[in-house]
Amino acid sequence: MSNFNSPIRLSSSLIKHLKYRVRMGSNPLLPHSRPFTTTEGHRPIIVHKRSLDILHDPWFNKGTSFSFTERDRLDLRGLLPPNVMSTEQQIERFMVDLKRLEEQARDGPSDPNALAKWRILNRLHDRNETMYYKVLIANIEEYAPIVYTPTVGLVCQNYSGLFRRPRGMYFSAEDRGEMMSMVYNWPADQVDMIVVTDGSRILGLGDLGVQGIGIAIGKLDLYVAAAGINPQRVLPVMIDVGTNNEKLLKDPLYLGLQRHRLDGDEYLAVIDEFMEAVFTRWPHVIVQFEDFQSKWAFKLLQRYRNTYRMFNDDVQGTAGVAIAGLLGAVRAQGRPMIDFPKQKIVVAGAGSAGIGVLNATRKTMARMLGNNEHAFQSAGRQFWVVDAKGLITEEREDLDPEARPFARNVKEIHRQGLREGASLVEVVLEALRGSTSTRPAIFAMSNPTTNAECTPEEAFSIVGDNVVFASGSPFKDVDLGNGHIGHCNQGNNMYLFPGIGLGTLLSGSRIVSDGMLQAAAECLAAYMTDEEVLKGVIYPSISSIRDITKQVAAAVIKEAIEEDLAEGYREMDSRELRKLSQEEIKEYVLNSMWSPEYPTLVYRKE
């Protein structure tokens, strides 16, 4: 169905399409020499601006790194200090400045130092994207908690006050009927990755409305830093359908729609229009849904997952990371991963993330037990689910349909001395009864740090030194005395979603299948050595994130090929993709990852 009103509109859009291909560094009339994004980073880029316009464009600005030749070509001579600096010198100067300004940037003693760091990094992002990602990649362990959880939660809470320069796109309830044309306002002709939120459930902070755009920006920072997605091909999106946060509704400085949220068919119509619009302009884009309230998370996932290239990170990404950690916890007991179906698992929380973990974990167990109906039923008996009202049983009234498969049988729990609504402590004690596990696992996965169910200090002091501990946000390891360390693992989605997105992109799969997600989780679970796991280290260091992402992406591609879903990417068609060995797939992934290097810029008048 065409959404253009006349041939003139279509013609102008085509012209715009061709112009942007030139701007992005490709000749629309000539084939690419290779399919890898890294080669694009090294070929000259045609730009249609010069002088101060170049210096004010973060996509192309190099600051003091512009060579004299480029300064002449782009009319920059005299607009920059005469000393041409290397990127290493630029980074050194920035880091010295960062350390000096950290305290000065604080808004008084109540302003956390992490927020001051975010401000400084954000200013760099606004003026020089290449250098920003070079700094982020080189210091990923230090700065991931700044651009992502836990600091991003604080950023979202204060976003209306922190907003300086627009980043991403905003689609609102006021834009109904206009989204198909709105998508052409975005300057990039090619978008590989979109992270979209409606701001209804940001981390564990609740409804933050339009301010939730911060989580989409932070996620895409990690797509660039970890997966090497070209930053000119990512798009953070906020869908503003209102907010039910009364504080924001009364705040005169709030930047979003000050009305209560749309619901029902009206809400679905907005999301449907958005999805149709972005996939009409960018048919091969991948859309990651982020921090949608549980009420809609599952419905939207089921509505779109078989039609569009999309996944929900809270439901599917969290589940994958949890499975990887649980498999690691089995290995930490000195047992093979095939023993996983014997584990008893208590889940506190029946929201989108909790139910996502339950569904994926039951599927994993069932697959290990034979992948039949009996195996599926048997696996379901290994779970106890506790929400705000206590243990969920078949007696529960108005039970969410998504949680119903995990409701415990009433007669069975009565024999165990439990009841509907039993407390978390009662349920945990019952689950531990008769357990032969020498290393119980506690995963306090809620974000940000202030919302964690318990601290590692509490876990090790109460349960004992042998506990395997993981959390969603970072904590420091615990000194247990006598030279022993209680390792605090960060079970964060950043280990998986960049690789899932990159693997889906490079495979050309039209959907993100359960098998691809399972392959990602098992790849992460196997990443750690036996020696590391036996020490209680079940997740790798964030400093290895690009290598982890490469491995996960390769596993996703391999699974897409085996499921006959892979259609190829650019010149790597499906036939060529099927010929690659596992090592060649990894090389293909590595060669396709963008690196932050300044390209040569060549001016051409439009």
Image (cartoon, rainbow, N blue to C red):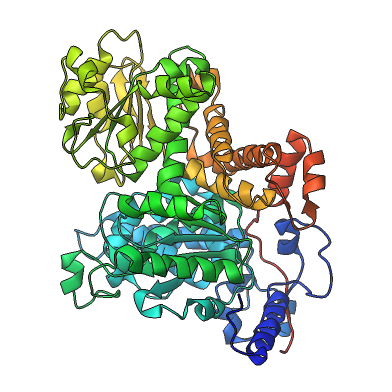
Q: Position of residue 209 (x, y in %)?
A: 29, 65
Q: Position of residue 523 (x, y in %)?
A: 58, 32
Q: Nearer the viewer, residue 294 or 214?
A: 294
Question: Is residue 272 placed above or below 526 in the rendered structure?
Answer: below
Question: Is residue 96 placed above or below 280 in the rendered structure?
Answer: above
* Left or right relative to 285: residue 109: left
Q: Residue at x 22, y 27 (%)?
A: 458
Q: Position of residue 553 (x, y in %)?
A: 62, 43
Is any part of residue 167 visible from this angle?
no
Q: Position of residue 58 (x, y in %)?
A: 55, 73
Question: Is residue 379 placed above or below 14 in the rendered structure?
Answer: above
Q: Residue at x 40, y 68 (%)?
A: 269
Quarter in which the C terminus is drawn:
bottom right
Is any part of residue 564 visible from this angle?
yes
Quarter in which the N terminus is drawn:
bottom right
Q: Nearer the viewer, residue 521 or 47?
A: 521
Which image quarter: residue 190?
bottom right
Question: Is residue 170 placed above or below 244 in the rendered structure?
Answer: below
Q: Residue at x 45, y 51 (%)?
A: 301
* Left or right relative to 154: residue 326: right
Q: Nearer the viewer, residue 445 or 484?
A: 445
Q: Nearer the viewer, residue 598 or 167?
A: 167
* Left or right relative to 276: residue 33: right
